[in-house]
Image (spheres, rainbow, N blue to C red):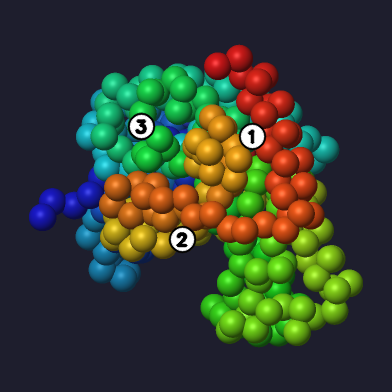
Amino acid sequence: MARKKIALIGGGQIGGILALIGTQKEIGDIVVLDIPQVEGMVKGKALDIMELRPHDGYDANITGTSNYADIKDSDVVVITAGVPRKPGMTRDDLLAVNLKIITDVANNVKKYAPNAFVIVVSNPLDAIVYAFYKVSGFPKNRVIGMAGALDSGRFRAFIAMETGLSTQDVSCVVLGGHGPTMVPLPRLATVGGVPIDKLLSQDKIDAIVKRTREAGTEIVKLLGNGSAFFSPAASIMEMVESYLKDKKRVIPSAALCEGEYDVNGYFIGVPCVIGCNGIEQILEIDLNSDEKAALKNTVDHVKKVVEETEL
Ligand code: APR
């Protein structure tokens, strides 16, 4: 069986780490595409990774390019093209510039990789994934936004850090938009099946929820230039693997809701089953009244940003 082909549109911080992890996991041949002005940078990263392969015996190929013809017939496309935040900026501040970029990217992906499963990462995520969907005309099961995997991963990390227990045994879900209005659900968070309110005080849980909502900003402030890239890359890879290996993992992701959670026509973070058919199912959770109100708040915010796209 021929190797799968994975195109990374945007070979910056996240794209570079993603290329490395993808090579180490041998997910397939990887093509990293960026703008002509930085073609040397992606070619250099790709060649560096090609030369890393003998150390652990990886065989898949990785190339850098600025020519869309090179992504032809990719099975998976991951889009990180765009600009990241600087300290003091919100994700929404990126809309105008990243909207222009996603329009160009969507037209090219439609032309060269019309059957790909597309994972959008660029911010503001919920609006940019919506824009990709509108411009490309791809079916809704093949367009997904990466946010919940990262947000719930951060939630899991903080629970593990506070309890001192293994990250492996922490399970939790975050719903809603990718920003401070997101809805972590501590009521459903467990460590090895034990609800977290048996392990942590309410004050600690509240602090973890707050930190999860602000986790991206915490890193933007520390880095001083750009936003998180290691954990986003790992989050994307979970989604790529679930698709390529038909794992049917349940990963919170931005998906087009058409009635689910009373949302119609918007991409919102919801638990998605990801398998060989892309988004195979959106799982619904019975929310209590506070959680419903929080979800309504985040959906209202997403709608406002999406309306600004005028798509
Ligand atoms: N086509 C392809 N690549 C592009 C385009 C375009 N039209 N415009 C910009 N890029 C490239 C940039 O040249 C850069 O190499 O996208 C890359 C983005 O990389 P970084 O600036 O390092 O940003 P990164 O940290 O990887 O984040 C990318 O993901 O989390 C979000 O908010 C973040 O929107 C940002 C995106």
Tell which circle, 2 or 3, labels the residue nearer the N-terminal end: 3
* Numbered disc 2: secondary structure: strand
The residue to which callout 3 is attached is 139
* Numbered disc 3: secondary structure: loop
Q: Position of residue 294 (x, y in %)?
A: 76, 48
Q: Quadrant of residue 151?
A: bottom right
| Foreground: disc 3 or disc 1 | 3
10 Å crowding of disc 3: few (<14), some (14-19), many (20+): few
State whether residue 247 is above or below residue 71.
below
Q: What residue is rendered at 29% in x and 60% in y?
A: 245
Tell which circle, 2 or 1, labels the residue nearer the N-terminal end: 1
Q: Which mark is residue 124?
A: 1
Disc 2 within 8 angstroms of ligand 1 (CB): no
Q: Which mark is residue 250?
A: 2
Disc 3 to disc 1, C-alpha distance? 21 Å
In the foreground, 308 or 103 = 308
Observer able to see residue 25: yes
Disc 2 to disc 1, C-alpha distance? 23 Å
Identity, as a three-letter code, of the amino acid under mark 1: Pro
Identity, as a three-letter code, of the amino acid under mark 3: Pro
Q: Which mark is residue 147?
A: none
Identity, as a three-letter code, of the amino acid under mark 2: Val
